[in-house]
Each structure stands twice: as structure tokens, then as C-alpha cells.
């Protein structure tokens, strides 16, 4: 049956479809009133603090205006994320209104102490970077960040000094750096080998697996927590499987949807701490968080998943 995740989940909600019916179509819908199961967690190497392996990315989907009709659904998505045990919310001053929108949601939900706030400095110059930090503190109505990252290594030497100073002052708990561009991978590896960081962030997916060749092993060797952005390759993975069923053998690992197939491939990598897919609907959030439950693919199964992907 040629049916998308969006089409099925919308129809299932209207019909009150059961989770078993959803699984038969390669999609998952949590039964209403179902109690959230505990999410698998991984430790931050530098501290031992544990975090759920599925988080929330906010680029694009949360960049909306104050009167956007999607706001209630976006807020419901954040609420679902928090209620079902999610913690890491990743943002950036370059994501338009996303930081202010998500910050407002979290504060209206009274959930500041339940989330792990990650944001970035993404500019040139020390004072410009400090201005971004101050704006983010205001937008999130908070006095500290859990994680502050230098975005895409932009003016790294300048901003890492600012972030480390803020950490010394108690305004930042963890220090990190990000990139999402393959052209920068060589420079990124060199930086990871040189700098002592708590976190690094990189793109990684079945469609774009190149970072597992050197970057993920380097982060693991250096004792860094790893956040994975673009685990769906900007929805490219979903486009490739449109109209196709999840393989039956994936059920052995609790996989009931393509989203869970893609995410479990990513988070089962031994270097990965958390994947942060952009998510804009409560039912998608529940589906994604299902990837943080049940058995994880082992190395042999990961090879099978990648080989299967290459046949599509």
C-alpha cells in the first residue's frame, strides 16, 4: 500500500486505530492513555550524566510567527516529548524564531527543569557571540544552558573561549562544537583531536553514513558525547521508502515504523549519545521516541540494515 507516515497517522487518529494495525502498515500509533515506557539512556562520557537517546531538533519546523496556526500542534509536540521522557532540545540563533517559540512552550509547560537545553553560537566576533548568548538566555527565560556549542566551527577559537568562560561562571554545563557539512569533515576531525570537548554534533543517517568512517570513531576515542542531526537526511530517507513496507525481520528489534528503523540504525552506533530529529506533530514524536525502547540492533544487524537500504 502506497501510504505515507503522515497519511496513516492522520487517518489512524481519526479512526482510533490500534497500535497493532499501525504496525502492520509499517507505522506506529500509541494507544490513547498508554503510559510512557522508560527510554533507553546513554551517559555523557565527561560526567556520567545519562540522557535519553532520542531528542528534539528545532530547525525549520519551529521557525514560525507568533500568530501561526501551527503553534498549538507544535506546543502539543513539545508537551508529548517531555511527558514521554524526552530531554534534549537542540536549537540555534540561526533557526529564526525557533528558540523563542520553543522557550515559550517549555516555560508555559513549567518544564525548564525537565529538559536539557542545547544551543549554539553562530556568528563572527566575540561581542557578536556574547550578544547571541544573551539573546538566547532571554528567549528561553533561563539563567543557564546545559550545552553551548560553536555552530559549524564558525570562528571557533573566539567562541570556544567565551563558552569555556561561561562554563567557569556556571552559566554553561557542557561545551561542544557542530558541523553538518561533508566538505568540513577533515577540519572537524583535526579539531576533535586537538580540543577537549564534552559534546560534538554531526549529521549521520542511512542516506548519509559517511561520518561513521572517521568522525564518530574519533569522538568515541576522545570521550565525547555525540549528538546526531539530520537522522532522516532532511526527510530524504522517507522519500526513498514511500510505498514500501518495513522489513519483517526489523520487528525483532521492536521496529514498527520507518522512523524507528532509521533512528535505531543511528542510535545503535556505539559512539552515539542521542539523535535529534526535527519533529512537528505529537504522533510523530511518539513514533520517534519508540526508537528509544526495546532491543537495539547489534553490529551484524546494522550491517543488514545498511545492506537492505542499498537495495531500495
Image (cartoon, grey):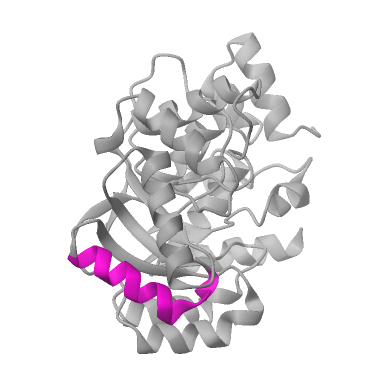
Q: Is residue 296 visible?
A: no
When the figure is inspected, residue 147 is found, relative to residue 74, above or below; the finding is below
Name the image quarter holding the N terminus: top right
Q: How many numbered tags mark residues here?
A: 0
- Judge left or right: residue 207 versus residue 144: right
When the figure is inspected, residue 288 is found, relative to residue 93, above or below; the finding is above
Residue 188 located within the stretch drawn in magenta: no
Give the x, y percent position of residue 289. Answer: 44, 39
Q: Which residue is at the front of the view, 63 or 18?
A: 63
Give the x, y percent position of residue 56. Answer: 47, 44
- Judge left or right: residue 116 versus residue 4: left
Q: Which residue is at the front of the view, 220 or 129?
A: 129
Q: Residue at x 69, y 18 (%)?
A: 11
Chief secondary structure of the magenta span?
helix
Q: Which residue is at the front of the view, 33 or 89?
A: 89
- Judge left or right: residue 249 versus residue 4: left
Instruction: Give the residue at the far top of this rendering.
Output: 15
Give the x, y percent position of residue 240. Answer: 77, 52
Give the x, y percent position of residue 36. Answer: 34, 28
Q: Residue at x 54, y 45 (%)?
A: 58
When the figure is inspected, residue 309 is found, relative to residue 224, above or below; the finding is above
Q: Which residue is at the front of the view, 130 or 152?
A: 130
Q: Residue at x 51, y 34 (%)?
A: 101
When the figure is inspected, residue 19 is found, relative to residue 245, above or below; the finding is above
Q: Which residues are magenta?
A: 152-168
Residue 165 located within the stretch drawn in magenta: yes
Amino acid at each position: 500500500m502506497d501510504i505515507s507516515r503522515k497519511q496513516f497517522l492522520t487517518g489512524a487518529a481519526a479512526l482510533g486505530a490500534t497500535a497493532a494495525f499501525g504496525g502492520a502498515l509499517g507505522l506506529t500509533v500509541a494507544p490513547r492513555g498508554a503510559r510512557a515506557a522508560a527510554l533507553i539512556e546513554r551517559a555523557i562520557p565527561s560526567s556520567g550524566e545519562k540522557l535519553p537517546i532520542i531528542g528534539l531538533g528545532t530547525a525549520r519546523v519551529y521557525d514560525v510567527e507568533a500568530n501561526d496556526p501551527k503553534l498549538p500542534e507544535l506546543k502539543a509536540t513539545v508537551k508529548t516529548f517531555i511527558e514521554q521522557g524526552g530531554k534534549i532540545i537542540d536549537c540555534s540563533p540561526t533557526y529564526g524564531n525557533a528558540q523563542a517559540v520553543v522557550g515559550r512552550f517549555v516555560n508555559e509547560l513549567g518544564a525548564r527543569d525537565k529538559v536539557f537545553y542545547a544551543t549554539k553560537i553562530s556568528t563572527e566576533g566575540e561581542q557578536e557571540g556574547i550578544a547571541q548568548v544573551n539573546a538566547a538566555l532571554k528567549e528561553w527565560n533561563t539563567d543557564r544552558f546545559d550545552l553551548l556549542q560553536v555552530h559549524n566551527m564558525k570562528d571557533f577559537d573566539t567562541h570556544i573561549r567565551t563558552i569555556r568562560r561561561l562554563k567557569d561562571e556556571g552559566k554553561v554545563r557542557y561545551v561542544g562544537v557542530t558541523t553538518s557539512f561533508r566538505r568540513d569533515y577533515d577540519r572537524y576531525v583535526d579539531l576533535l583531536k586537538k580540543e577537549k570537548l564534552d559534546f560534538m554534533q554531526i549529521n549521520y543517517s542511512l542516506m548519509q553514513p559517511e561520518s561513521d568512517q572517521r568522525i564518530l570513531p574519533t569522538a568515541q576515542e576522545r570521550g565525547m558525547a555525540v549528538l546526531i542531526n539530520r537522522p532522516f537526511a532532511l526527510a530524504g530517507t522517507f522519500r526513498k521508502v514511500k510505498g514500501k513496507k518495513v522489513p519483517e525481520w526489523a520487528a525483532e528489534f521492536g521496529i514498527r515504523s520507518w522512523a524507528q528503523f532509521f533512528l535505531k540504525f543511528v542510535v545503535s552506533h556505539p559512539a552515539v549519545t542521542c539523535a535529534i530529529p526535527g519533529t512537528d506533530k505529537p504522533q510523530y514524536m511518539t513514533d520517534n521516541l519508540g526508537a528509544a525502547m526495546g532491543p537495539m540492533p547489534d553490529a551484524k544487524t546494522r550491517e543488514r540494515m545498511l545492506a537492505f537500504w542499498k537495495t531500495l
